[in-house]
Each structure stands twice: as C-alpha cells, then as structure tokens.
Image (cartoon, helix red, strand yellow):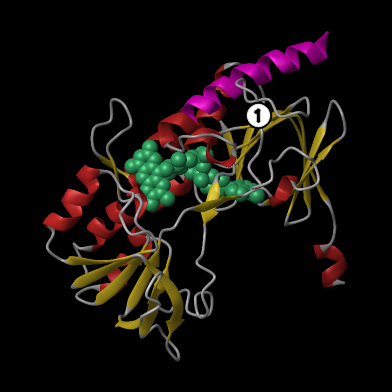
Amino acid sequence: MMSSMNNEVKDMGQYDVIIIGAGPGGMTAALYTQRANLKTLMLEKAAPGGKMMSTYEVENYTGLGKVTGFEISEKMFNHTQELGVEYKYGDVVEIKDLGELKELHTSSNEIYKAKAVIIATGTIPRGTNAPGESRLTGRGVSWCAICDGAFFKDLDIVVVGGGNSAIEEATYLTKMVKHITVVNILPTLQADAKAVDQAKATGKMDFKLGYEIVSFDGEDKLESVKIRHAETKEETDIKCDGAFVFIGHLPETTLVKDLGITNKWGYIQVNEKMHTNIPGIFGIGDVIEKDLRQIITAASDGSIAAVEVSKYIETLRK
Ligand SMILES: Cc1cc2nc3c(=O)[nH]c(=O)nc-3n(C[C@H](O)[C@H](O)[C@H](O)COP(=O)(O)OP(=O)(O)OC[C@H]3O[C@@H](n4cnc5c(N)ncnc54)[C@H](O)[C@@H]3O)c2cc1C
C-alpha cells in the first residue's frame, strides 16, 4: 500500500518558465522572467545560493564590496522573493522535450510542465579518485571549508589543489586550524599572486608542489594522506586530521544526458544568447561551456537567457 502511494506520479502544474538551480545564475534569471510577467518557478535541490553558500568571502561582485558567501546568497534570494518568484524544493532528474512543452521529472515522482526551461545546475567538486577518499568523506575528508572548517580547530590539515579556490579556502582555514600542508600536482601554484601572498603571510602553510595524492588513510577517520612526487616517485605520509579537496569541478548535467545538448566533457553547449540546440531549453552559469566561471558571469548569463525566454514564449503565442 505504502509503496504504491510513493510511486504515484504527482502533476505539479504548468509554468511559462522553470529555472533549475538557485545559484546566482538561476536567481538572476528568475528575477528577470518574473519582472517580465512570466509565470516563473525556481526549483532547487539544496539551498538557495548554490556554491556561494560554501564560499567564505566574495569581493569581486560589483557594488557589494567584501561580503560573505552567505550574505550575497541571502541578498539575491530575498530579492527574488520581494519580486514574488515562486521557489520550491525539487531535485530534477530528467527533462523531456515534448516540443512546445517540456516536462521536468523530480526524484520525488513529481512532474512539472513549462514552455521554457533554464538549466542553472552549476558544477560539483571533482575528486582525486584516490583510495580512501569516498570512504573517509565526512570522516576527515571534506569539500567545503566554510561547512567543515570549524571541526578542525587547532588541528593539522592538508589542502589538495593549487588554484585560486584552493589557496583562498586554505587562507580562510588558517583562521581555525593549526597548520596546513598544501599539496599540488603541478610544480607551481596556479592561484594569482595576491592570493598566494595572502596565504604565505599567514605563516601557517607549507607547500608540497609536484606531488600527487596516493591515498587517504585511516581506520574510522582520516589519519594521514600519502603523497608521491611526480618525478622522483618518493612517497611521504602526512599525518593530519582533515583533508580538503579543491581541484576543480564537474558539470551537473545527468538530468540532460539524453538530450544531446552537452559537449564531450558534459558541459551544456549554448550560443551567445544561452540557447541550446533545443528550442525552449536554455543553459546558464557554470554548467555551460565557457571560459570564466564566476558569480557575475553566471548572473549575466541569467539575465540574457531570461530575455531570450520572453522572446521565445512570444513566438509560441503567434
Ligand atoms: C570555493 C569557491 C570559491 C569561489 N569564490 C568565488 C568568488 O570569490 N567570486 C566569484 O565570482 N566566484 C567564486 N566562485 C565561483 C562561483 O561560486 C560560481 O561561478 C557560481 O556560483 C556559479 O553559479 P551558478 O548559478 O552557475 O551555479 P551554482 O552556484 O553551482 O548553483 C547551482 C545550483 O543548482 C542546484 N542544482 C544542481 N542540480 C540540480 C538539480 N538536478 N535539481 C535542482 N537543483 C539543482 C545546486 O544545488 C545549486 O544550488 C567560487 C567557487 C568555489 C567553489
């Protein structure tokens, strides 16, 4: 009885446009479509803000100065709510293209219909795939400094990665932890000079450059990370209580895997107006093929897509 009730498909109604993902891209698109008087729904499977919610500080969004990731998420979400954007929890697992209507299927067996869909699902952190990484995730291995940093107060940790995200997050972590060993596979850091200078000025970091991760080790919780020098093959165990992995991201596109709108790396391909090759389906933000993945570029994509959605829906009315 119970299982047949759970399998029941729920018709959740029809909208002009549904935006999947409430990061900066999705929230900006939503406020533009709402102001264009389109019946708009924003579906989000976690919390509004997207990756901004797991970023400590942002200081490159024009006009806002230095804000925390939480503050900018809250400001953007409140803005959508002041304008009356409908927001719901929903983990979209599939989009079906039925021509002038699109069907969105969620993991809770709900079906939403829309004339247009904007995909703003962003990216998820990439793992090293080293043994022990998934087993010890949540037991010392983490992907989010702002979420988990406080667990490592006065302890020794490893940060994996050498780009801006890794170095800036490591600098943030120095406020809590005792010492950080930064392990980067390349012989140099890719982060910009300002970020590297700030990191070094903390006096709490040392750098193992040109090393790959061999394994994350420990019984019930992380106890050490084994690294190997890329050239000499010399192996070292770094004793630590935590390890944060910041080595890039992968696109969240399993929901469109059958639509043929992604490139070989899984990123959604769009033209400069954010159209995919399927009329009525648009892609924006970090999930699309692009050079610069930032809050401001995601927001900019969102505004462009919203205007294109309005024009597209107008063509359906003719
Ligand atoms: C550690 C770190 C620090 C950063 N610092 C900065 C910075 O200082 N300045 C800056 O400009 N940028 C920074 N960035 C980059 C910036 O966060 C991203 O470029 C931006 O958040 C992308 O926005 P988005 O809307 O495309 O996607 P995201 O922010 O990734 O949001 C996507 C949303 O979609 C939701 N979602 C995914 N799949 C589904 C689904 N199937 N159904 C429903 N919802 C779904 C997710 O839960 C998420 O909330 C940083 C990134 C990281 C990781």
Q: Quadrant of residue 304?
A: top right
Left or right: 94 with respect to 81? right
Q: Position of residue 12 (x, y in %)?
A: 76, 42
Q: Residue at x 74, y 37 (%)?
A: 261
- Determine whether, in the image, residue 40 is placed left or right of residue 314: left
95 relative to 138, above or below: above
Identity, as a three-letter code, of the amino acid under mark 1: Val
Q: Secondary structure at mark 1?
A: loop
Q: How many marks?
A: 1
Residue extent of the magenta highlight: 299-318
Q: Nearer the viewer, residue 158 or 155?
A: 158
**Most common SS among magenta residues:** helix
Quadrant for residue 182, please give it: bottom left
Q: Residues within 10 Å of mark 1 (few under 14, many from 20)?
A: many
State left or right for residue 170 relative to residue 5: left
Residue 303 inside the magenta-drawn segment:
yes
Return the residue found at the far bottom.
219
Q: Residue at x 87, y 28 (%)?
A: 99
Give the x, y percent position of residue 196.
22, 51
In the drawing, does residue 163 fall left or right of residue 279? left
Identify which residue, 208 or 204, lies in the foreground: 208
Question: Measured from the top left, where is residue 7 in percent x and y?
Answer: 84, 62
Residue for badge 1? 270
Does the image show residue 236? yes
| Residue 146 place in picture, x, y as percent | 33, 58
Q: Is residue 102 magenta?
A: no
Tell me the residue at 58%/41% (across/down): 287
Residue at coordinates 27% horizontally, 37% vertically from top-left?
A: 59
Q: Considering depth in this image, is 99 or 108 the residue closer to the camera?
A: 99
Question: Which quadrant holds the C terminus?
Answer: top right
2, 247: nearer the viewer:
247
